[in-house]
Image: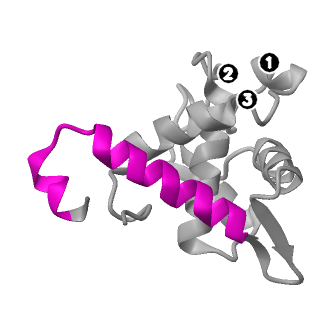
Amino acid sequence: MATLYDVPAEDLIEALAEELDGRIEEPDWVEFTKTSVDRELPPQQDDFWHVRAASLLRKVAIRGPVGVERLATEYGGSKQGSTRYRVSGSHHTGGSRKIIRTALQQLEDEGLLETAKGEGRRVTDDGRSLLDTTAGETLEDLDRPELQKYA
C-alpha cells in the first residue's frame, strides 16, 4: 500500500485539493489577502484555498505535531531590503498566520487534524487514512515507471 511518502508532493497536493474541494469552504476574505508580507498581490489561483489546505495537511502529517508559527516560517519568503535610497540585504519573513490558522481550524472541524496540548496540531487517524488513500489512487494514475515499485 502506498503512503504519502511514496508519491511526489505536487501530485499528492493536487489530488488532495480536489478531495478537499467539497469538504472545506473558502472564506470570503481570501481573494483580498496576501499570503505573506513579501508578496505584492494576493494569489491568482482559482483553487488557492484548497491547495494551501492540502499542503498544510501534508506538512502536518510529515512534521507533526507542529504549530502555526513553524508553519508560517515554512510558508514565508525573502523580503527584499533594498530601495533606491537604502541598501540592505534580504530578510526572511513569515507567511500569513491568519491563512494558516483558519485552514487548520477547518481541517480540525472535518476531523482530519487534532490539537495536541502545548505541542501544536497532528493528524488524526481519519486524516492519515485520507492521505494514504489519496496517495494510493494518485500513484495508480501516475504514468511514471520509476514509481511503480511503490504500487
Q: Residue at label 1?
A: 32
SS type, badge 1: helix
Q: Residue at label 2?
A: 42
Q: Nearer the viewer, mark 3 or mark 1?
A: 3
Residue shown at the point (43%, 52%) measured from the top left: 135
Q: Position of residue 129 (x, y in %)?
A: 60, 62
Mark 1: few/some/many CA within 10 Å (<14, 14-19, 20+): few
Instruction: Give the residue type at disc 2.
Output: Pro
SS type, badge 2: loop
- Residue 133 sits inside the magenta stretch: yes
Mark 2: few/some/many CA within 10 Å (<14, 14-19, 20+): some
Instruction: Give the residue type at disc 1.
Output: Phe
Which of the two labelled residues, at mark 3 and mark 1, occupies the earlier sequence position?
3
Tell me the CA gap for discs 3 and 1.
22 Å
- Residue 140 sits inside the magenta stretch: yes
Q: Nearer the viewer, mark 3 or mark 2?
A: 3
SS type, badge 3: loop
Q: Residue furthest left?
A: 145
Residue shown at the point (82%, 29%) measured from the top left: 25
Residue shown at the point (76%, 17%) measured from the top left: 31
Number of marks in picture:
3
Which portion, as a residue range, is magenta? 124-149
Q: Which label belongs to residue 22?
A: 3
> Which quarter of the image is occupied by the N terminus?
bottom left
Marks 1 and 2: in contact by CB < 8 Å?
yes
Instruction: Give the residue type at disc 3.
Output: Gly
Foreground of the two, 34 or 83: 34
Tell me the CA gap for discs 2 and 1.
6 Å
Marks 2 and 3: in contact by CB < 8 Å?
no
Q: Position of residue 113 (x, y in %)?
A: 77, 63
Relative side of 129 to 12, left or right: right
